[in-house]
Image: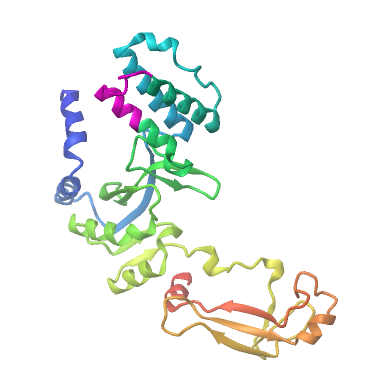
Amino acid sequence: VIDPSSLTKFRKLRLQDQNLLDLLIEKTIAIAMDLDLIETGTIIVDATHTQSRYNLKKPQEILQDQSRKLRKTIYSVNESMKEQFPKKNTKDDLEAELKYCKELIATIEQVPGLSANPKIGESLRLLEETVADDIEQVRCSSDADARTGHKTVDTSFFGYKTHLAMSVERLVTAAIVTTGEKSDGKLLQSLIEKSCAAGIPVNTVIGDTAYSEKTNLQYAEDNHICLISKLNPNITDGHRKKEDEFDFNKDAGMYVCKAGQMAIRKARQGKKGVGTNQKDTYYFDIERCKRCPLREGCYKEGAKSKTYSVSIKSTEHAIQRD
C-alpha cells in the first residue's frame, strides 16, 4: 500500500504544476484510447465549486486573532502583564473589538521597553496597522488566493472552481482550476483544446446555458464542433414579462398594443458590425397614449414618446436557438 505521506507530498508539491496535471490526464486518455474505451468525440463540460478550507473572516475576527497572538507573545516574555491588560471584548461587534484593541495597544505602549522586543514589536505594529485600516481593507482570509463566487443570486461560496471536461464514458479529458468568481463559459475553448491535446477528436460538446455565449458559438462553428447548449432565456425570450408583450401584425409589419393601437413607425437602433445586438424600436402615437384607458403601467405621464423595442438576434444566436 502506498504510504500516505507520499500521496500528501505529491498532492501538495507536485500537483501545483498545471502541466503535470495535464500530463497525467493525457496519459490516462492514451491508455483508454489504446484499449478502445473511448468510442466517440463527444465531451461533457461543467464546473464544480470547491469551498476553501478557510472561511472568509469577519473584520472583528481578524482583530481578535491578531490581538490574541500579541497577548500570547507578551505572556511568553512577561506573564504578569495579564493583570494590566483591559477586559477582553465578548461581543460580536466590530466597534467594540476596535475599542478593545486600541486600549490594548495603549496599555502595551505605557510599559517601558516592552515593544522593543522584536517579536512583540512586530505583532504590535501589525495590530496597529489593522486598526488603522478601513473595514473593507480588514476583510481578508487565511486563503489569499480564494475568491467569492455565486451559485445563484442569493447564495455564494468562498473558494475555487474546477472546470472539467469528460467523455461520455466518464473519463476526465481536461481540468482547469480557477478562483471562485470566474465564469464557466470563458473556459470552454481551453477545455476543448486540452481535450484535443489529450487525444480526443472532439466533434460534439454538451454543456448548460453558461457555455452558449456568442464567442463560444463562433468558436464551435469555426472549428466544426456541434455545441449542444441552450441559450440563456434572456436571449430567447427577452426580459419582458408575458403580460407586457405586444402582438405583432405580420401583414402590416408593425406591433399592436393591448388597446389595439398600431405603431406609426419603426427604426433600427444600434451600430452595425459591433458586438452588441441591434434592435427594432416601434413608435406609437403619443396623443392617443395620453387618452388611452389602459395607459396605467404602459404610458408614463409626461413622457414625450411611447416605444416598444425588440432585440434582433445575431445569426449565431438564431442558429443556436433552432
Locate residue 55 relative to residue 116 in the image: left or right: right
> Residue 157: which quarter of the image?
top left
Closer-to-camera residue (173/184) = 184
Q: Check residue 124 for magenta coloring.
A: yes
Tell me the quadrant of the picture where the N terminus can be found.
top left
Q: Position of residue 246 (x, y in %)?
A: 69, 76
Q: Report the side of 158 relative to 172 (left or right).
A: right
Q: Please tell me which residue is depicted at 48% across the width and 18% down the height of the picture.
A: 86
Where does the image place residue 135, in percent across and percent down from the top left?
48, 41
**Res. 254 image quadrant:** bottom right
Query: Residue 69: where, in percent of width, then height?
Result: 35, 22
Total number of numbered discs in the rendering: 0
Residue pictured at 43% horizontal, 30% vertical: 63
Nearer-the-camera pick, 109 or 165: 109
- Residue 243 covered by magenta stretch: no
Q: Identify the residue at horizontal 32%, vertical 57% (top origin).
A: 187
Rendered view: 29 above or below 65:
below
Seen at 51% across and 80% down, the residue is 278
* Residue 139 shows in the view: no
The image quarter in which residue 92 lies? top right
Horizontal arrangement in the rendering, residue 300 relative to residue 3 (left or right) = right
Say above or below: 197 vs 141.
below
Display coloring: rainbow
| Region of the chain picked out in magenta, as a range | 111-125
Front position in the image: 56 or 288: 56
Q: Locate residue 119, reporting x and y percent.
A: 26, 23
Q: Is residue 32 visible?
A: yes
Residue sitting nearer the eye, 99 or 312: 99
